[in-house]
Each structure stands twice: as structure tokens, then as C-alpha cells.
Amino acid sequence: MSLDGFHADTNNPLTSSLITHDNDTREYVLDPRYKLLEEASIANGAVLENVTVGQGQYGMTVLAIDPSKAIKIHLPESLLLPSEAVDFSTNTVKADVEVTDAIREYWNLYLDTVFGPEALANRRAVEQAISKENLHEWQEEEQIAILQRFLEVSENDSVLRQKLSSARVLSRQGNHFHMPYLDWVNHRHPSLGFATSKNGVKIEGEAFDGEVFVSYGMHDAMKLLNTYGFFNETSFAYAIPTSFKLSQELTLAVSNNNLDPLSFKNHILVPKIVRKDNVILADFCLLGNKGRPRAPRMSWRTGVNESVGLDSKTKQQMMALYTGIQRRTWQSLWKIYRRGEQVENEALRNLMMSAARDTFRNSL
């Protein structure tokens, strides 16, 4: 199972959830569609034990009703919405999809809630700020691929919905599904994990101070911003996408995308390093692990030593390149931070600077 495409955007100030501020009571008022979808989830077979939607530290989220007791959220297979079933031009389930009227109504309520006019307006505001600052062009000129997705500007509503959609899906066996209700659970690592089976998807266990969290994986702050569109403090730092010439014929390409499930050895996260023709692909090169200063070099050394198809000379070159990978990552993070300082839009400025600062701090 890959969780790279799963996203709950409720802790993103730029794509914030449907919560309004009541100036009389100084309290947040939850959009009624959230409660409607919660009730419809139960009516259509979802198991929601000791949970309810409400206001968390990052905005709308899922809370434990009784924080002293465990929670359980189980979404049966019948409620998982296949991404291919969505008509993004109308933001509804395609007419030819064979499903009961109740499930169609349920899915359409979900789509209206998460990809409706409010969500589009919020992201449009971000993209207007990105366009005004020429940030996408800046990213291309500086070759900072780590923010390529986040700084893209969508052409129309349909494309924009697909972009928002791709950050909220669960990928299983090559198929992509939306998880109504479950995708409102915000990210924290470490925390609860997803359990998937032919019967659906579920999370269960203890809440965190009354709020339910689930881990999207061991991502650093820059990866979270680029993939999911929000900032979250992390304990990790990974190398930015970059490349090095090892010889005239051979190139090392460092990526921050999963080529394969990462492995653990002696509690160290080991990158996947493979050779394909004249390119060596090194995935998720760890540059920092809070509280474990020796872990990154051990991780790189283990990954290089265990890589397949590399001779001893090439492995020695790669060992020596670790410092160069660090340096290039620091340079890019510094560029992002300094460019972020100049951004007029406060929310966008804070996101860029916070993600760069957190990743840089963890890489030291």
C-alpha cells in the first residue's frame, strides 16, 4: 500500500476547511455538511466509534468523544470512492457508474464538501499569489524540484480539482480511492496507521490529547508541503532531488520519491539505491533524524553497500558524495527560505519559510 497520495488538507491555512468564525461568540462554526456526511457515513455502513468531527488544533478534524477511550473508524469497501468514477468537470460521480442512489448521494455530498466552491476559492487564492510572485518560473529557473507541484498553477476548475484530488487519495494495487470521513484525520508522525483489507480501510487506537491523528509516512516538511500543501513540524530531513555526474557514462540521481518500500536495518531507514542503464537512482536519502545524529550517514552507507549492480569504485564515489548531497540540499533550502521572505502573501510566505527552516534544522 502506498500512502504518498493521501491527504487531509484541514491543517493547511491556504486550503482551510469549511469553518467560519462567529464574531459574536468568538468560536468557530462548523459547516453543517461535515455533520451531514458523518451521519451519512454511519447510515451507509461506516463504523465510527468514539469519534466526531470538530475543531482541532489545525482546523476541522476528527476528535475522540471520550479521550480516555480508544477510537475506531472503519470505512467499508463499498464507501471507498474510486477516483476514476469522478467527473471533475462537474464535481460529481459519473452518470454511468453503477452504484445505489444512496451511495451516489453520499459520494456527491463528499465531493461538494471537499472540492466545492470554497476549496477551489482557497486554492485559487494561493495560485494567484504564486502567479503574482512568479514563483513557478523562479522554481524552474533555480531548478528546485522539491516545490514543483506546490507552485504549479492550474488551468481551470477541472484541472484544479484533479490536483486537489490527487493529494487526497489512497493508492492500492494501482487503483486510487477517496476515503470520505477518514481523510479528515490529520497527519502526525508517529501516530496511528491505516489498516487495509478487502473489507475496506480502518484506523483504531488511542487519540492524541483528544484529537485523532494518522501518519501519512516518514516525510519531511518540504515533502509534506509539495505533496499535500501544508506545513507540519517533522523529525526528518531528506535530500532534495538533484543529480551528480560520476563519470561521462554514469549519473547519480537523488530523489525524494519512493521507488520501492524503504527497509529498516538496525532501526536505520535504508534508502533504495538501484542502477538502471547509465543512471543510479537513490531514493529518500536521509540527511537528518532528530535525536539520532549518526543515523543519516549510517543510512547512506548501508544503502550504498547493499545496492545491486555497483562496483566498488562507484560505491566509493557515492560514499564521498554524501557531503555534496548535503551541501546542495542546504543551498536549495536557503534559496527557498530567502525567496519566501520576499513573498507578499502572508500565508504563502509562512509556508515556504517554515518548511525550509524545519527541514534545514533537521538536516544539521
Image (cartoon, rainbow, N blue to C red):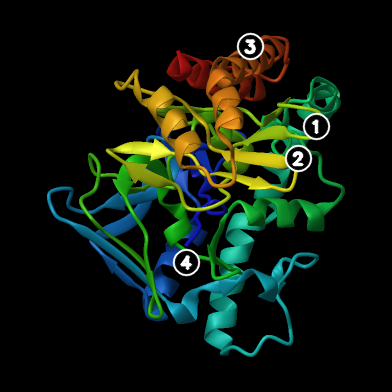
Please state which of residues 217 and 228 is positioned toward the viewer in this rendering: 217
Residue 256 lies, with reference to residue 319, above or below; the image says below
Q: CA distance from mark 2 to mark 4?
A: 25 Å
Which numbered circle lies on residue 128?
1
Q: State if disc 1 and disc 3 touch (CB < 8 Å).
A: no
Q: Residues within 10 Å of mark 1 (few under 14, many from 20)?
A: few
Q: Quadrant of residue 44?
A: bottom left
Secondary structure type for disc 2: helix
The kind of residue on which mark 2 rests is: Arg
Secondary structure type for disc 4: helix
Q: Which residue is mark 2?
A: 124
Q: Earlier in the sequence, mark 2 or mark 4?
A: 4
Q: CA distance from mark 3 to mark 1?
A: 24 Å
Q: CA distance from mark 3 to mark 4?
A: 43 Å
Q: Earlier in the sequence, mark 3 or mark 2?
A: 2
The kind of residue on which mark 3 rests is: Trp
Q: Which residue is mark 3?
A: 334
